[in-house]
Each structure stands twice: as structure tokens, then as C-alpha cells.
Image (cartoon, grey):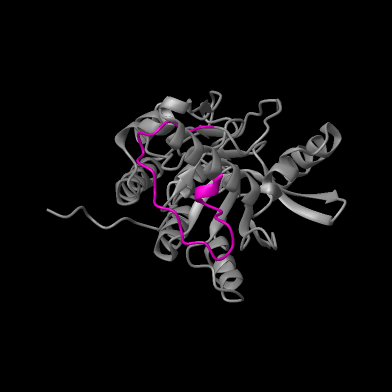
Amino acid sequence: MNAAVLSRFARSTLARVAALGFVLLGAAAGPTQLAQAAGGSLEARKLPMRFEWVACEPNCTGWISAVGIVTADTPKDFDDFARSRPLDGAALVLDSSGGSVNDAIALGRRWRQMGLMTTVGASVRTQTPSGMRAGIVPQAYCESMCVFLLLAGRTRYVPEGARVRVHQIWMGDRAEDARAASYTAQDVTIIERDIGRLAKYTFEMGGTGDLLALALSVPPWEDLHQLSPQELRDANLVTAQALAELLPPKHAAPPATVAAAAKPIQDRFVPSPVAATKTAEAALPTGGTAPAALPPPAH
């Protein structure tokens, strides 16, 4: 690499770091602040998903924080939230333990229609000499159906330190002791139907069979499988190399999407260890309330 190329690269890198000073401030929070953020995030992940607009003036236009599990009300809650501001093309930061399969699919399609960009993280606010500043730390989880919401982003970034974990979809009301529970033929039909819907959605969003194979190989009585950096790429869950591609400086033109095969790099987050957790699908049936009788199969 010659001197001119190195000089251009250095100027570009410095500009991107300066533009994302708000993220560095958030990630540079002290251990106590990070522990408090992680603890609060863990509790919030158990509640129905909530949406918040996080302003980061004057550095960028802001982002959407989405924390919690997807319920039957979540798609409508998001639409109500979206009516109050223009969100097309915005970045969305996920911290979620999953939730309802069909409602997550509906929500993911809505996000793709809006051209949202997705990542995993916890939104924090840090006191600085110039006042409160917004930031994102990677100490967050995206589990179960959240992974398929992550896939809905037209641009997707997973920072080092974030936990992206998968398992099989299951009848939510029997996930706590799945092996001891009883199942009817109709229950099995509902699960298989929803697997088909999930497969169709995955390919619509540009995901691969690797993601489905990984998720469907982990029963609910085992620990969730955490995707490695290579598995994230194989599943096509990563299409950007840095958070800057999702949060460009205000008034900047949106950056081009980086090829999925590119190696993700950590240059915007400072990770710290977080204790592993074991979760199951949210206590919601995978296909909602079962009908009294299923129609005969088409021939």
C-alpha cells in the first residue's frame, strides 16, 4: 500500500471515528455504568418489546431502540410508534430474547419494507462535560426470533461482544419442560407450519439455509447456540463492517452495503464480559391459538 493510499485511509478512518464520537462515549462508560446497563437490559428483555427513538444530535440523525420480546401486540405497537416520526432507512438497535414466531415475521417484513438497518446493542446515555450523550454498547443479546428480526435489516452489523443465539421454535407454553410435556398431532402440525413460514421468510430476507439448519438443530432443553463470526457470515446476518455504515453523520449520503463475505471488524465498540444466560422461546404459542380443526391438505 503506497503512502497516498495510506494517507487517504487514515483521513477516512479519522473522519468516521469523529463522526461516531457518541458511540465511543457510550462504549467508554465505566464498569459500574456498563453493569447497570446490562442488568437493566436483562430485565427489559423479559418484557414486551418497547420502541424508543434515541437522538444523538449533533452527530447523527439517531436510531430506534427495540428492547424486549415480540408479542401479538408488537407489530401494532411499532406502527403506532412509527407514525410519530419519519423512520424510513433508520438504524434499529436490538436487545431481545425473541418471542412470537408469526408476529416477528410480520414485524420483520415491515422493517424491510421501510428499509431499516439493524444491529445488536444496548442504548446508553453517558454524562460528559458537554452534557448527556447517547451511545451504544455491544453488551446485548439477540436470541431466538430476534435473530430473524436482525435479518430483516437491509444492512446488518453484529459487533464483537454481542450474543446472537438460536434454537428451535417450540410451543411457548411448553418450552420450560419440553421433553416432559404432552403434544397432540395438531400441535406438531402448528410447529411444522410455522417452520415452513419461517423458511420462506428467511430466504425472502436474504438469509441462508445455514441459519435455519443451525436454529432447527438445537432443542429447547439445550443451551442456545451462539453463532460464531463465521456462522454469522455464512447465515448472511452480517453485511456491514462497522457501525458507521448504519449511523452515518447527519446529512451524509447513506453508505453502500458491504458484501456479506467481508470480515466484520470491531472499531466502534469496547466489549466487556457478560455472564451467559439460558432462555427459551417466549411463553407464547408458535402459531397463536390453534383452530378447532385444520382444513384438509391441498392436492
| Residue 218 image offset from top left, x and y in percent | 45, 26
Magenta residue check for 249: yes
Split into 4 quadrants, where in the image is the N terminus? top left
Closer to the camera in the image, 254 or 143: 254
Closer to the camera in the image, 179 or 212: 212
Task: State how many labels appear.
Answer: 0
Closer to the camera in the image, 232 or 47: 232
Magenta residue check for 178: no
Would residue 129 appear left or right of 299 to someone viewing this image?
right
Residue with the most extreme front position: 3
| Vertical order, 64 against 164 (above or below) | below
| Vertical order, 85 against 236 (above or below) | below
**Residue 215 visible in the displayed image:** no
Closer to the camera in the image, 80 or 103: 80
**Residue 124 visible in the displayed image:** yes
> Toward which corner of the image does residue 73 lie, by quadrant?
bottom right
Q: Main secondary structure of the magenta part?
A: loop
Magenta residues?
A: 243-265
| Residue 23 image offset from top left, x and y in percent | 68, 46
Would residue 273 appear left or right of 7 to someone viewing this image?
right
Residue with the most extreme left position: 299
> Toward which corner of the image does residue 221 lie, by quadrant?
top right
Q: Residue at x 16, y 55 (%)?
A: 298
Residue with the most extreme bottom position: 84
| Vertical order, 271 against 282 (above or below) | above
Would residue 83 appear left or right of 106 to someone viewing this image?
right
| Residue 126 image offset from top left, x and y in percent | 81, 48
Would residue 202 appear left or right of 250 to someone viewing this image?
left
